Image (tube, rainbow, N blue to C red):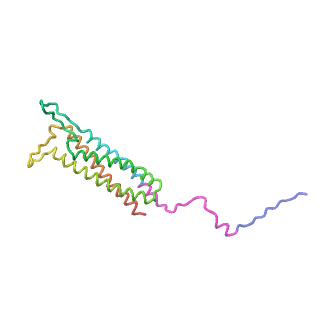
Amino acid sequence: MKSESAAIDIPESSSVAKGKAPLIAVSRNEKGGYRKGIAIFDFILRLAAIATALAAAAAMGTSDETLPFFTQFFQFQASYDDLPTFQFFVIAIAIVGGYLVLSLPFSIVAIVRPHAVGPRLLLIILDAVALTLNTAAGAAAAAIVYLAHNGNSNTNWLAICQQYGDFCQKVSGAVVASFITVVIFVFLIVLSAFALRRH
């Protein structure tokens, strides 16, 4: 005789069905992708700011020119370390560049965890401090560069850029690069504020 096996279907109770998790997870906030985009753009801007800050510090730090003529007692030379303002510029912009390098890991954390508030809050505070230092250094150096180009007849300060053309070109480029860094910092702060505002 043939034995037939019978399968018995037992329906699941409603309590078991409720405990099942869906196979495809649905994100809690489908619109959160823009935060990751902001964080990636923040990282790219930081890389650009590092380049401009270090270029400004390097250009100012290597600005040195000696005129081809000299006397028995004098050699005509212009260097950034002749002026304390330019020394302050090099130190301040180097500090800003160092801060930007050290801020990259926090920017990466903001990319990996776009909803984290802590790294963004820390970055926006430190970015504001770095922006202040960068602006102070750039503005002080810009005043000296202006005097080097135009002089001041009221105080009998002569314009030296006709004689020291290479020196003036380098320090002017350094000041321009520092103000580009200032603009990038403004964008970074606005981006961070926008990302924090949306939390």
Q: Quadrant of the C terminus?
A: bottom left
Q: In the displayed structure, would residue 10 be above or below residue 98?
A: below
- 106, 199: nearer the viewer: 106
Q: Residue furthest front?
A: 73
Asked whether residue 64 is drawn in magenta, I would say: no
Relative side of 35 to 154, left or right: right
Q: Is residue 50 left or right of residue 30?
A: left
Q: Residue at x 15, y 35 (%)?
A: 76
From the top left corner, tell me how far across and down residue 161 is, in percent: 16, 40
Residue 95 point in image, percent of width and height = 32, 48
Front residue of 168 and 92: 92
- Residue 129 against residue 9 in the figure, above or below: above
**Quadrant position of residue 75:** top left
Residue 126 lies, in percent from the top left, at 35, 55
Magenta-drawn segment: 13-38
* Image quadrant assignment for residue 132: bottom left
